[in-house]
Amino acid sequence: MTDGREQTTAPAPAAAEDTDRQPLRDRINSDSLTTRRDYLRIVAIVSGGLAAGGLAVAAGGLHRHGDSEGSPKAKRVATVIGAGESVAFRYPGEEDRAIAVRLSDGSLVGYSAVCTHLACAVLWHADRGFEGELHCPCHDGAFDVRTGDVTAGPPPRGLPKVVLVERADGSVWAIGTARSGESLEEGLCRQLLKDYPETAREIGCPGAPPLGEERV
Ligand code: FES
């Protein structure tokens, strides 16, 4: 069971990481992600609607969540997340604060936990708003938990998303990010196209290379 505390995962050797990642890729493939429609179904499963900072970030002063062009390594962020619970974690890098939330209807959502105003920590409050709220206490900024969009306060844009998947054993994994203003589909495809073009083609990413033209 998760207790809502930040979870960390010790760095693993490259071979072990590849081993960890393979089951996820296998799952993606085994879910018959051969059409765009199927991909969108997975996106819906992933986050109920499938990882930027404030002025300092815009000015290049801080690392920007989701800046990676390539595919971040998959990372287990929780053994399980119950309804109404949240888990804080770091993804895609160890300096990237992120948060995963299980909504009351079972949907999983993941976001950067760095406020897009001045980079304070964004927190989950299950008792705020209609179905809970992502809130920044520094200047009372608020974000829609289903979309990451700004609902109150000074943040200039929504929260970047973290692509989450739930495995059969209930564990929750982060497998990619999407920038502010980018859909989960766009973010995931941007990263897959660079490192896993064959998978990008299988799930129907726009711009994926035709069969036989994948990078060797
Ligand atoms: Fe979050 Fe200002 S830093 S609202």
Image (cartoon, helix red, strand yellow):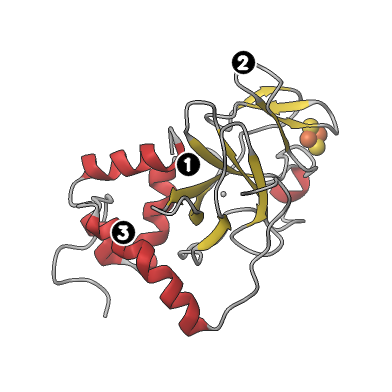
Q: Which mark is residue 182?
A: 1
Choose top left, top right, bottom left or bottom right for residue 212.
Answer: bottom left
Q: Which mark is residue 27?
A: 3
**Within the image, what quadrant is residue 214 found in?**
bottom left
Q: Is label 1 in a helix, a strand or a loop?
A: loop
- Amino acid type at circle 1 is Glu
**Image quadrant where residue 81 sits:** top right
Q: Are marks 3 and 2 in contact (CB under 8 Å)?
A: no
Circle 3 — which element? helix
Structural distance between the alpha carbons of marks 1 and 3: 24 Å
To which residue does mark 2 refer? Answer: 130
Badge 2 marks a residue whose secondary structure is: loop
> Of marks 1 and 3, which one's residue comes earlier in the chain?
3
Does 212 sit above or below residue 2?
A: below
How far across and down, in percent of the image, does residue 209 sit? 21, 63
Q: Residue at x 44, y 49 (%)?
A: 166
**What percent of the width, then of the height, locates residue 85?**
63, 37
Crowd band around label 2 with a 10 angstrom C-alpha radius: few (<14), some (14–19), many (20+): few
In the displayed structure, would residue 14 be above or below residue 158? below
Most foreground residue, 59 or 209 = 209
Going 43% across and 76% down the picture, which residue do you hit?
A: 18
Q: Amino acid at mark 2?
A: Phe
Q: Nearer the viewer, mark 1 or mark 3?
A: 3
Label 2 and label 1: CA atoms lie apart by 25 Å
> Does the residue tagged 1 have its C-beta within 8 Å of any atom of ligand 1?
no
Lateral position of residue 11 relative to residue 28, left or right: right
